[in-house]
């Protein structure tokens, strides 16, 4: 007899396997929770698709009235931007919209002689809400508007006068954030009843206009350093 007492049942080393058992369950539960949360966020992102790019309406009416003259903005005009973004490794687009658009085109015969578009950047909203980070990036306090001015006349052709959709590559100056640069625009236009509809898009690299991209959060979410400016104009003949 050594006098050494045996450890009571259920104490000492006998408890370690049970602790490890519960640790494995806790880790497994945490992993499942992470997967469920990630899946829920992914589903949320995918189930909220970005608005479609601005384009000519699907239906048009037969053209009416004279074509030559000045054409100004009418209700239904809208402009904005699209910027690729990622969240948890999934891609989507951030889309801004503004209806504070003023434009004026001059048409002579079958040619677009001149044109300007002005967008009030302070009116841009994302999902119906104004975003302070975009206002800061665009510097809307100092540079409240973006303008596009047609560089040279563009032939539209007899098909446009007849009411068919036409596509033309045009050039002009896009001015925003205090920088003016020559850009190329793919323009789609047509007559519909007594109005003209025109849609176009301009690729924009933020650095070219000294625009600071909004801060990102790495894998959790970030915005690209480029995007697309787009517009849909509805114009009525002023004179």
Image (cartoon, rainbow, N blue to C red):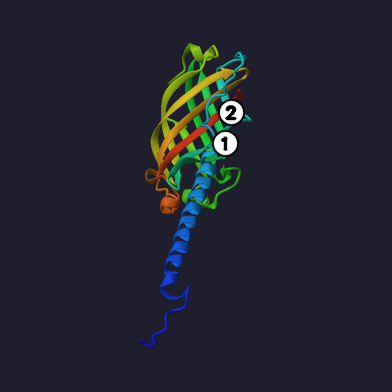
Residue that extends furthest to the left in the rendered view of this protein: 2
Instruction: Give the percent coordinates (x, y) of residue 210.
Output: 40, 48
Q: Which residue does the numbered mark 1 point to in the structure image? A: 101
Q: Is residue 149 above or below residue 236?
A: below
At 46% from the left and 66% from the top, the residue drawn is 18
Please report the residue visible at 62 percent of the width from the left and 29 percent of the height from the top: 74
Instruction: For label 2, count other residues whose C-alpha is less than 10 Å away and answer few (under 14), some (14-19) or many (20+).
Output: many
Residue 198, given in percent of the width and then of the height, sits at: 53, 25
Residue at left 57%, top 44%? Answer: 125
Q: Work out whether residue 44 can be spotted.
A: yes
Specify whether residue 153 is in view: no
Q: Nearer the viewer, residue 31 or 38?
A: 31
Closer to the camera in the image, 92 or 72: 92
Q: Is residue 126 above or below residue 4?
A: above
The location of residue 93, given as percent across then percent down, is: 48, 40
- Write down the residue under mark 2: 72
Distance (Cα) linking label 2 and label 1 = 10 Å
**Above or below, 105 relative to 22:** above
């Amino acid at each position: 007899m050594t006098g050494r007492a045996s450890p009571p049942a259920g104490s000492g080393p006998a408890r370690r396997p049970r602790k490890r058992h519960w640790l494995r369950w806790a880790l497994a539960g945490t992993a499942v929770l992470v997967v469920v949360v990630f899946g829920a966020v992914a589903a949320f992102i995918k189930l909220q698709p970005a608005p479609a790019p601005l384009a000519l309406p699907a239906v048009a009416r037969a053209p009416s009235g004279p074509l030559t003259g000045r054409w100004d903005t009418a209700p239904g005009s809208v402009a904005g931007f699209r910027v690729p973004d990622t969240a948890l490794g999934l891609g989507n687009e951030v889309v801004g919209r503004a209806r504070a658009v003023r434009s004026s085109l001059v048409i002579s015969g079958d040619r677009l002689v001149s044109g300007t578009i002005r967008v009030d950047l302070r009116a841009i909203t994302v999902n119906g809400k104004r975003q302070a980070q975009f206002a800061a990036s665009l510097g809307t306090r100092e540079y409240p508007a973006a303008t596009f001015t047609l560089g040279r006349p563009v032939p539209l052709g007899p098909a446009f006068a007849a009411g068919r959709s036409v596509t033309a590559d045009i050039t002009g100056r896009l001015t925003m954030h205090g920088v003016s640069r020559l850009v190329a625009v793919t323009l789609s236009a047509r007559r519909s009843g007594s109005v003209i509809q025109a849609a176009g898009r301009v690729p924009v690299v933020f650095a070219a206009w000294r625009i600071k991209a909004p801060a990102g959060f790495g894998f959790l979410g970030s915005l690209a350093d480029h995007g697309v400016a787009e517009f849909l104009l509805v114009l009525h003949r002023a004179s």
